[in-house]
Amino acid sequence: MNVNEDRTANTDEQVRIPDNAFRELQPGEEYRPVVPPSAEMPEVTVRSIVQGAAWSVIFSAAATYIALKLGQGIESAIPISILAVGFSVFAVKFLQARSSTLLENVNVLAIGATAGIVAGGSVFTMPAIYILGLEGRSSFFQIFLVPLLGAVLGVFFLAPFRRYFVRDLHGKLPYPEARATTEILVAGKRGGKSAIVLSYSAIVAAMFDFVGPSLKGWAEVFSTSSIGALAPFTSRAKAVFTMNTSAAVLGLGYIMGINYAAIIMAGSMVSFFALVPLFAYLGSQIPSEITQGAGPIGAMAAEDIFAFYVRPIGIGTIFAAGVISILKMSPVIFQAIGQASRELIRLAGGKGEAPEQTRTERSLPMAGIVVGIAITALAILAYFRFSVLAGESSATYIAVVAVLMTLVIAFLFASVSAWAIAMISITPISGMTLTTLIVTAVVLSSLGLSGDEGMLQTLLIGGVVCTALSMAGSLVTQYKIAYWLGATPRRIEISNLLGAVAASAATTAVILLMAQVYGFTPGPGHPHPLPAPQPNAMAAVLRGVMGASGAPWFLYGIGAVFAVSAEFCGVSGLAFGLGMYLPMELNSPLVLGAALSWLLQRSSADKTLAKARHEKGTLIASGFIAGGALVGVLAALFRFIEDSWKVTIIPDLTKATALGIGAWLENWGNWIGLVAYLALAAALFWDSWREKAE
């Protein structure tokens, strides 16, 4: 009996994701979620709220620290889903309590996942306050409000597009992170073979990523720059191939699929094999430096040329592709605006809210969304007007302009961020935030706001927009999970709003603590500061736009040409721009994982057998993502303890002196990493290939 046909059939052993969950529907076909719309089961409970709030605080602190330390966010949704399933097992075996329902675990995820959202939005911008020396004009409350207001805006701006992303585009976008999380939640309820496959693959990935990146048993990034025989390509042509050796990225590529992975890699190849060598060649003819502080191009390493000259082209590509995406989505945008207007007119006429047909379609009412946006806008206006601009002439006028810019940019880019997450589970938030800072700085400068006040106001706007985009990207994942499993969208939205409060407080506290203990720029009190790469980039942009050097408008323009050209060729400009903007080390493993998926789908003329093999690979890939994410969080926690208490928990094998292991790993770690990574990919393929058809 299908679990969707009778709520009484929805036992743990029979929980199955429908066959049409991950493909486009045939004409007349309907998707029916795991939990039927007619089913009523515990969803928002004290258990789920307490769990979600606890994970939100813990993961906010971990995500903030690792972002400041390594410049990378950590995946919180997948570890939290695993912990939610684990608590359910613990409750049954040791607390003599009932098992958590599938929908309760979704609610835990909705509250807890705000950790990565708020941390990503706040950490990318707020530490720049200290880098620019503006901390005397700021406070805990000021930094706390930025991610909180941004997260609220993100929920309200994406809510009108929920049906478009999860229902109208069903099967057209891969949703890698959402799919992996859904597999974990369902396997946790179902148990049996699926749970075993997911568990051992997660353990293998955790061990792999711990021995490699954490213990430095091999190079975390394979690079041709470490191969002496390729010196003519690396030192002269500046053409370098890199590949991250993380199991999590391999699994992400498998779920993403070959189409988008190939487009992203194509953009990366243009950046690293065409543009970087081109700039190196042209720069060799110019002995003086072009960008102040960068040095002559001829003396720069390939990664520095990418950072100073090629990555801005990627930012321009993303910005232009985002504008094109917004134009393509304009019918949906106008439809959402029209729907909001009609509901407001109906409410004004005293007719009340139109009832929802089913539980799984019940979301925040459009009138409530409009009112929520209005209240949030007024809060932002008061915040800007009486926080930074209190002593400025024309303060009210500038504050109104700042709020309008915040609302417009966040609204337009929210759908772009959601689309990027649905496509590859990576959203170019830092690129879009840089664009926001540039546009905002130019506009505020034209209004006469400059200096410290101008930079602080620009950062606050950028922080609100950045968090709104991060929230939109995470929420679209949760919407899709809710759509597949049968959760109530309105409860997802409210849980995100509540979780944002705890996450904002935890993230702000960690930022202030890190600023006091480590700092973000070298100085007498902080000789070894945290790198904080994104905030330093934001600070550099502000100094450039509001200073004498100006922004690299020409490079942004070149990027826009790439975006338009890609769209004319029928290629996703945003995917291509992501490839140009992101380091190649993150893009090349995606293609490897996607190639494995493509091969397994075509591994047999028997479609049933090929499908079984591919689905086994999906479970393994989901386990890889989960295991890699978990070990990343644990490694971040251990590093924090090491730095705080000056102890060694995770040894560095490259510094081991016994039997010359350290020196050997230094010399051969690059090749060991490549061989180990290819062996891991081969193991994924072999284990999936030996699956039998059901």
Image (cartoon, rainbow, N blue to C red):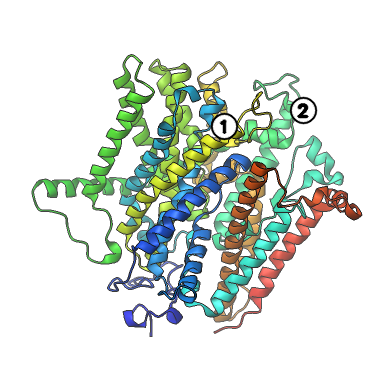
Callout in the foreground (1, 2):
1
At which x and y percent is residue 341? 20, 45
Cβ atoms under marks 1 and 2 closer than 8 Å = no
- Residue 516: assigned label: 1
Q: Residue at x 56, y 58 (%)?
A: 259
Q: Is residue 616 left or right of residue 284?
A: left
Residue 39, compared with residue 491, is above or below; it is below
Q: How many numbered dots are placed on residues in this image?
A: 2
* Residue kind at label 1, given as amino acid type: Gln
Residue 380, compared with residue 333, is above or below; it is above
Residue 669, compared with residue 174, is above or below; it is above
Q: Nearer the viewer, residue 432 or 126?
A: 126
Q: Residues within 10 Å of mark 2 (few under 14, many from 20)?
A: some
Query: Of callouts 1 and 2, which one flags the residue occurring earlier in the amino acid sequence?
Result: 2
Query: Disc 2 marks which residue?
Result: 299
At which x and y percent is residue 355? 18, 61
Q: Quadrant of residue 645?
A: top right
Q: Secondary structure at mark 1?
A: helix
Q: Residue at x 39, y 63 (%)?
A: 47
